Image (tube, helix red, strand yellow):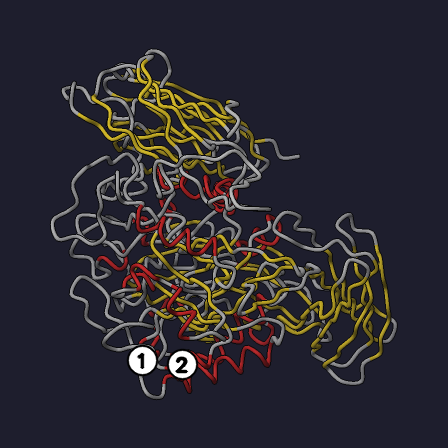
Amino acid sequence: MSRKITCFDANWKFMLGDYPDACLPDYNDAEWRELDLPHDWSIEGRFERSNPTGGSGGYLPAGIGWYRKHFKKPDGEVVLLEFDGVFQNCDVWLNGTHVTHHNYGYIGFECDLTPYLVEGNNVLAVRVDNSEQPNSRWYTGSGIYRHVWLTQASETRVAHWGIFVSTPYVSKELAHVKAQIELTKPADIVLAILDPSGKVLVEQTYSSKTSKFVGTMYLENPELWSCDNPVLYTLRTRVIKDGQLEDEVCTTFGVRSICFDKDKGFLLNGIQTKINGVCIHHDGGAVGAAVPEVVWERRLKLLKEMGCNAIRMSHNPPAPELLDMCDRMGFLVMDEAFDEWKIIKAKGDDQIARYGYGQFFEQDCEKDLLAMIRRDRNHPSIILWSIGNEIPEQSTSDGWKIAKRLKELCHKEDPTRPVTSACDNIKADKNRTTEEFLKTLDVVGFNYINRWRKYAETAYTDIRYEYPNMIIIGSEHGSVGGVRGDYSLEAEPGSWWSFPYNSRMIRAEHLLKQTMIYDYIAGDFMWTGIDYLGEARWPRKNAASGVIDMCGFPKDGYYLYQSIWTRKPMIHIFPHWNWKGKEGTVIPVLCYTNCDTVELIVNGRSFGTKCYEFPKQGMTERFGHYDLPILYATTNDLHLSWDVPYEPGVIKAIGRDRYGIVQAVKEIRTTGEPTGISLSFDRTTFTGRGEVAHCEIRVVDENGDTVPTAQNEITVAVKGAAELIGLDNGLPEDLTPMKSPVRKVWAGMALALIRATADQGEIVVTVSSPDLESTQAELHIYNK
């Protein structure tokens, strides 16, 4: 039989706590909670300072939990179960027999259920032990937090993660498509390349006398995969034995070439391409680690609109569907295996090293690294394997030996991609990264080079002089960050992470200019693209280092990167203009733009035209000759600023090009008092159970404008065939449980996530507030 893959997420039972007899098939689970996967029990808890996860885990609970599922015996010679991710220390039983144990919570694993199945009813039991805390950086979630898949297959089939497609030769006229296939038993193989519409372009039949096979096909006039044109082909692999189809697997891939060069940085299909990247963590804010696909889709669209073209999966392997989206949407990816090797990092509020991947590194590192590479190697989006983030062994005398072993393992499984590690101590006085460690890496990842002494000013320029043959990428550097809607002009006392709103961008701008202008710097991944749970200090539940908050609402810093990374004319001005009681007080008004000049007008009065120029225009044919009109820059920064005495009214920014033609206009105005609630959905219809909609909630004045200072309490009620799965406002200090239907908006906004619970039906969403007029919306489920 050809394989059949079924989503195995529905109709599980769950109980928090440890129940050793729950592995037995006749255990009574009638009182257990019924749910669908993916599931994260930590996000269902309360934020408490006493929770052992501490700030590393966002002050949420962890512990031990059990899952059980009853199902009929499936057909098939072989029945396999694949878990995309269970956090962590997972044991699986079928009908009372222990099937497997798996430690690492960030990578999936496969179980062969065939020997343990019985006719009729079968009982699967899964114990998840996330009780040793804190054990990771940062928030992990707890439970079976990614999808589960059931595969019915023949004994003669493609092995698990047994296909590797690469394109060793690429041109506009011809591509060599190399297919490495591993089978469970020798058989004939029919390979076909399909275009995006499903049309067969090339097909070849091979006979293999061994279980491993390598074949090359030739694709004429291929469309090359790129960030702007992410075209995907499909390799269809059919396994034939005695004339019968035994298995069929379809593998998407992209035709593209990649190269890292010490002088030119990164080249995609031979074209120099600057990596404009962000780091992201694996949680989805209000939904924790069990992230619906549409949450990532919405976030990736925002990053794409910002001009981002690359994502570092920090600091562990991501969900498979996230990589699929990167392939489809045209993002470059650094896929990262570990945040720890043998030396366990300090975590929690007391910063003591207790638990972590270091507990399992010696026994599991090769297995887990191979799993990541074999699972992910067909994604054209992936351009780098990272074997570690800020690994303490970077500074030990023999750490380079571990790096060498892991690098060689990567190269053996995938010789097409280079290997990096994100190093944070390259110029530290103590625990400095060793020369041997740096030389081991194909591409050297720099974390926070501008935090060390003179490198705060020179950054990579001295590094280039010291290491002229080194291939350099910025694997992690600070973004603008801050809390959306927070316009404080004072830093937290003694803080190196909190800056006034009118200066918090300056350090990021300095490094951004260097990264963009020097060819030898392949690019940078700024920390972070999106806020994430964890890395917090009580009473905050999350870090605020992103340019997008946990709700997916852009912060002001988002527009700094958009102004440099995109060409469509844009202007963003801030702060808001609601400063009741501060009449006459000077308020710094800031602007991010890619227009050549900006004039600021307040209540009809001009406060002058200002501009910056990046990159600066140099002379061309002769002394004093410029191709474009000269700009007389008013700053060397990447933002503009005016000091404006506050008076209620309207601020208008007018962006013009060098010839004085208006390119963009932006206004902000003083709003009235809150009077109502506005709802905006990214979808109002569902096609079935489990689909999710985002509902943006805004407190508005009588004119329908969002009130930027509003903090009204709201209640979200969902009736009908749906449920509220998360409600957040993006404020780190708000410790309201994520599943609560009641919370205050922050800076006038909140986000609700609504999930359909049936395949047909009607849904009514009502948002109310004690002092405001409530509002209501109808959603529909149509299962075609």
Label 1 sits on a secondary structure element that is helix
Tell which of 184 and 572 is nearer to you.
572
Residue at point 24%, 24% (across, down): 644
**Mark seen at residue 395:** 1
| Image vertical order of residue 589 relative to residue 8, above or below | above
Residue 322 visible: yes
Residue 742: percent from left, percent from top: 27, 32
Q: Which residue lies furthest to the front in this view?
A: 623
Residue 773 visible from this viewpoint: no
**Residue 661: image x %, image y %?**
53, 23
Residue 300 rendering spot, x and y as whole percentages: 50, 45
Decide which of tag 2 and tag 1 comes sooner along the chain.
Answer: 1
Quadrant placement of the C terminus: top right
Could you tell me which secondary element the residue under label 2 belongs to? helix
Q: How far across and down, in percent of the image, does residue 394 sit?
A: 35, 78
Disc 1 crowd rating (10 Å Cα; few below 14, some 14-19, many 20+) is: many
Q: Do the residues labelled 2 and 1 touch (CB within 8 Å)?
A: yes
Q: Residue at x 47, y 33 (%)?
A: 596
Residue 680 higher or lower than 221, as above or below: above
- Quadrant where the image shows the N terminus: bottom right
Q: Quadrant of residue 389?
A: bottom left
Q: Quadrant of residue 689?
A: top right
Label 2 sits on residue: 437
Towards the viewer: 222 or 159: 222
Three-letter code, disc 2: Phe
Left or right: residue 579 versus residue 339 is left
Q: How many labels does the image show?
A: 2
Q: Is residue 481 above or below residue 114?
A: above
Nearer to the camera, 130 or 328: 328
